[in-house]
Amino acid sequence: MHPLNEQATLTKILARVALPIEKLSKEVLFDCRMCGQCILHETGLTCPMRCPKNERNGPCGGVRPNGNCEVFPDKPCVWVQGIERAQRLPLWREHIEHLHPPVDWQLQNTSSWINLLTGRDAVRPRGWTREDGTWTRTNADQRG
Ligand code: SF4
């Protein structure tokens, strides 16, 4: 268990301070939807939660030939944007290839900074494992 998890009061105080700062800064900079499990550095600094399907592994099969969204034809697909932007990043360029587990909706409107510190954002359904920061889907035959 992460040491911060044993300090529930301290964690609550940190979360109370961090939440409005994170919300304000990331809403302005990235149109953040406060999912509480940030993967911006793996998506070309493009928030995947702006996708109307909340895809964490995109683009979906509905992306249009011009790179626009299937749901909102007048808007660019956020995943196409993410892939293009990732190529221009000095860091994390290849992270766009990473596989992501489903969103944990229990973390909605919590601080992803605190969830990262406490390790709460690494809690995922059985069948997903993370090694060296990379998620993999466990083979169904190996699941206990
Ligand atoms: S991935 Fe989540 S925390 Fe990160 S910018 Fe998007 S909604 Fe906000």
Image (cartoon, rainbow, N blue to C red):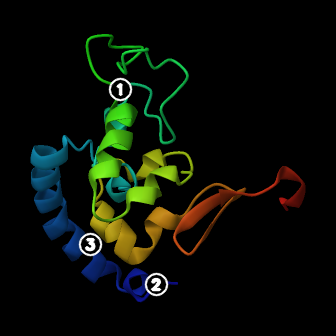
Q: Residue at x 42, y 80 (%)?
A: 5
Mark number for residue 12?
3
Few, some or many C-alpha atoms within 10 Å of disc 1 (few <14, some 14-19, many ≥20)?
A: many
Mark 3 C-beta closer than 8 Å to ligand 1: no
Q: Residue at x 55, y 45 (%)?
A: 102
Percent of width and height locating residue 136: 66, 59
Percent of width and height locating residue 101: 57, 50
Tell me the residue that label 1 is attached to: 77
Tell me the residue that label 2 is attached to: 2
In the image, 48: left or right of 23?
right
Above/below status of 114 relative to 99 = below
Of tags 2 and 1, which is closer to the observer?
A: 1
Q: Amino acid at mark 2?
A: His
Residue 116 shows up from this direction: yes
Give the Cα distance between marks 2 and 1: 37 Å
Work out whether residue 70 or residue 106 is closer to the camera in this orientation and state it: 70
Quadrant where the C terminus is found in the figure: bottom right
Mark number for residue 126?
none
Label tally: 3
Of tags 1 and 3, which is closer to the observer?
A: 1
In the image, 16: left or right of 57?
left
In the image, 60: left or right of 128?
left
Choose top left, top right, bottom left or bottom right for residue 111. bottom left
Mark 2 C-beta closer than 8 Å to ligand 1: no
Percent of width and height locating residue 110: 30, 56
Give the Cα distance between marks 1 and 3: 36 Å
Q: Residue at x 58, y 58 (%)?
A: 124
Give the Cα distance between marks 2 and 3: 14 Å
Q: Which label's residue is closer to the chain start, 2 or 1? A: 2
Above/below status of 141 relative to 60 = below
Choose top left, top right, bottom left or bottom right for residue 131. bottom right
Residue 35 shows up from this direction: no
